[in-house]
Each structure stands twice: as structure tokens, then as C-alpha cells.
């Protein structure tokens, strides 16, 4: 399946994006389940206390563990992470969705925000 760029050009992939489909959902199930657990404050605190143990509790893959340890949100997306779940984890790292969007596009946060405003 090919994603169409925001410019409307058929068949042109959007740089820095990963298609979140059934395969990605299956691949990222453990990571997304862990991120969902961060809806509870005590789970966020348990993660902060012992990140490696918390990741092990959810049976993350080595790639997922490395991406979490490296604070590599794009790596987490590539490992099947869904941005809506990853937003909880990014928040623990002090990042918001605009920070992640800037990383995906290779722009500064300010340039990414301006791009959003320009397309409104």
C-alpha cells in the first residue's frame, strides 16, 4: 500500500512515516500495551524507578527496548509503536506530539509548528 503525500500526489510516500496497519499493530502490540499502561500514574512512576524491569514486564523486543532506552520515538514507531500510545511515553520523556512530528519531518519544532499553521 502506498501512502499519498499531503500534497495530493498519488503514490508519493510521506517522508519519515510508517504505515500503521495490522502487521505494525501486531509487531508493536507489547510496546503499545506498555504505553497504554501509562494511563495510570503508579505505572509511570514504576517505569521511572526501573525502566528495564518495566520493559521486561511487557516482553518488549530487543529493538523496542533499545528504542525506549535511546528515547528514539521514530525507532519506536518503526518497531510498531502507535503515536497515540507513544504519546504517553513521550510525555514521560518531556516530549509532546509536536516534538515527535518535528523529528519525523527533520524540522525544528518551531518550523514544524509553522508548517502546520501554513497548511491550515
Image: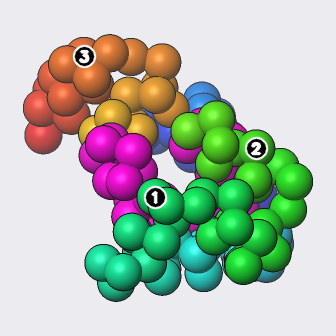
Marks 2 and 1 sit apart, C-alpha to C-alpha, by 16 Å
Q: What element carries label 1?
A: helix
* Chain part drawn in magenta: 72-97
Residue 78 visible in the snapshot: no
Q: Closer to the camera: disc 2 or disc 3?
A: 2
Q: Going from the N terminus, do you reach mark 3 or mark 1 first?
A: 1
Contact between marks 2 and 3 (CB within 8 A): the answer is no
Q: Is residue 94 above or below residue 46?
A: above
Residue to which mark 2 is pinned: 66
Residue to which mark 3 is pinned: 111
> What residue sits 69% from the left and 58% below the top?
52
Q: What element carries label 2?
A: helix
Q: Kindly identify which numbered label has been placed on residue 48.
A: 1
Image quadrant in which the N terminus is located: bottom right
Q: Is the magenta stretch mostly helix, strand or loop?
A: helix
> What residue sits 19% from the left and 29% below the top?
113
Residue 60 visible in the snapshot: yes
Q: Closer to the camera: disc 3 or disc 1?
A: 1
Q: Going from the N terminus, do you reach mark 2 or mark 1 first?
A: 1
Q: In this view, does 75 lie above or below 86?
A: above
Marks 2 and 3 sit apart, C-alpha to C-alpha, by 28 Å
Amino acid at each position: 500500500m502506498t501512502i499519498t503525500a499531503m500534497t495530493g500526489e498519488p503514490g508519493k510516500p510521506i517522508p519519515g512515516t510508517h504505515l500503521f496497519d495490522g502487521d505494525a499493530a501486531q509487531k508493536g502490540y507489547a510496546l503499545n500495551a506498555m504505553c497504554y499502561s501509562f494511563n495510570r500514574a503508579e505505572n509511570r512512576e514504576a517505569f521511572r524507578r526501573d525502566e528495564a524491569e518495566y520493559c521486561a514486564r511487557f516482553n518488549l523486543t530487543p529493538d523496542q527496548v533499545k528504542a525506549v532506552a535511546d528515547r528514539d520515538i521514530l525507532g519506536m514507531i518503526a518497531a510498531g509503536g502507535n503515536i497515540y500510545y507513544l504519546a504517553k511515553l513521550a510525555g514521560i520523556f518531556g516530549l509532546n506530539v509536536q516534538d515527535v512530528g518535528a523529528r519525523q519531518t527533520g524540522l525544528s519544532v518551531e518550523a514544524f509548528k509553522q508548517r502546520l499553521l501554513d497548511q491550515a
